[in-house]
Amino acid sequence: GQSLEQPSEVTAVEGAIVQINCTYQTSGFYGLSWYQQHDGGAPTFLSYNALDGLEETGRFSSFLSRSDSYGYLLLQELQMKDSASYFCAVSLSGNTPLVFGKGTRLSVIA
Amino acid sequence: KAGVTQTPRYLIKTRGQQVTLSCSPISGHRSVSWYQQTPGQGLQFLFEYFSETQRNKGNFPGRFSGRQFSNSRSEMNVSTLELGDSALYLCASSKGTNTGELFFGEGSRLTVL
């Protein structure tokens, strides 16, 4: 079976940096995605890593280590609006569906 | 361009009934995936349709079914509803290539009483 592990909750202070980790055990691996979902909203795509290394998009960065089956999402200069759930998701080989983790609920406090 | 549209947004059914949910993907997207989301369980994959054919199927009972029309719009049906089917049903569209990027609708929130 496929499994993705990420912390269930994280709390961080406004203006700080937070890292949300994701480890995966899957049969096949193509890439790692991250999604953000606000309460009552739709999941929205943040980033995708198919190769090892760091991808930066504004305040958000995502990292992948294929050899460690590990990735993380880094959020810098946290803002209150970043309070949301964050999901990692694995693309397996070929045209297979994304497998999602259970999500990390991030609370940004003043 | 218009996003993914799901209807209805909210519905209440009773056990034993059936329900049909609709999804209109982004124009030009040929793949539509359905996910069930329940508190603390993340997103569970139901099925994916590509060019009117079911390309992938998750581990849900046969009470869950779907289809895709020639205009890429998709429907999913749940028959003989159970209390445990209460969830947010999310539809996502994509071009169908493996880029890790899905475009989600706001979802249909189903409550089974």
Image: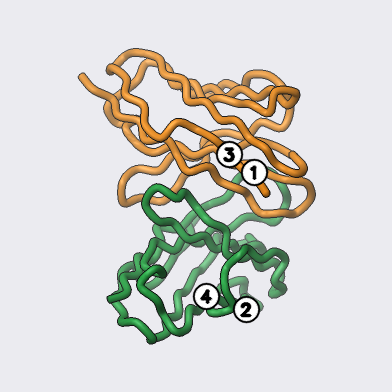
Chain colours: A orange, B green
Label 2: chain?
A: B
Q: Secondary structure at mark 4?
A: strand
- Residue type at the position of mark 1: Gly
Tag of residue B76: 4
Q: How dense is the environment of label 4, judged by Cα within 10 Å: few (below 14), some, or many (20 and up)?
A: some
- Residue type at the position of mark 3: Leu
Q: Residue at x 49, y 23 (%)?
A: A60
Classify A82 as above or below B2: above
Q: Marks 2 and 3: same chain?
A: no
Q: Which is more foreground, mark 1 or mark 2?
A: 1
Residue under label 1: B100
Cβ–Cβ under 8 Å for marks 2 and 3: no
Q: How dense is the environment of label 1, judged by Cα within 10 Å: few (below 14), some, or many (20 and up)?
A: many
Query: Which mark sits nearer the N-terminus, 1 or 4?
Result: 4
Q: Secondary structure at mark 3?
A: strand
Q: Which is more foreground, mark 2 or mark 3?
A: 3
Distance in Å between CA atoms under marks 3 and 4: 27 Å
Question: In which quadrant of the rendered view does residue A56 lie?
Answer: top right
Residue under label 3: A4
Task: State whether residue A62 appears in this view.
Answer: yes
Classify A75 as above or below A99: above
Q: Marks 3 and 4: same chain?
A: no
Q: Residue at x 47, y 61 (%)?
A: B36
Label 1: chain?
A: B
Q: Which is more foreground, mark 3 or mark 1?
A: 3
Question: In which quadrant of the rendered view does residue B14 lie?
Answer: bottom left
Q: Marks 3 and 1: same chain?
A: no
Q: Of B78 and B10, which appears nearest the observer?
A: B78
Tag of residue B69: 2
Distance in Å between CA atoms under marks 1 and 4: 23 Å
Residue lying at the far top of the rendered structure = A16
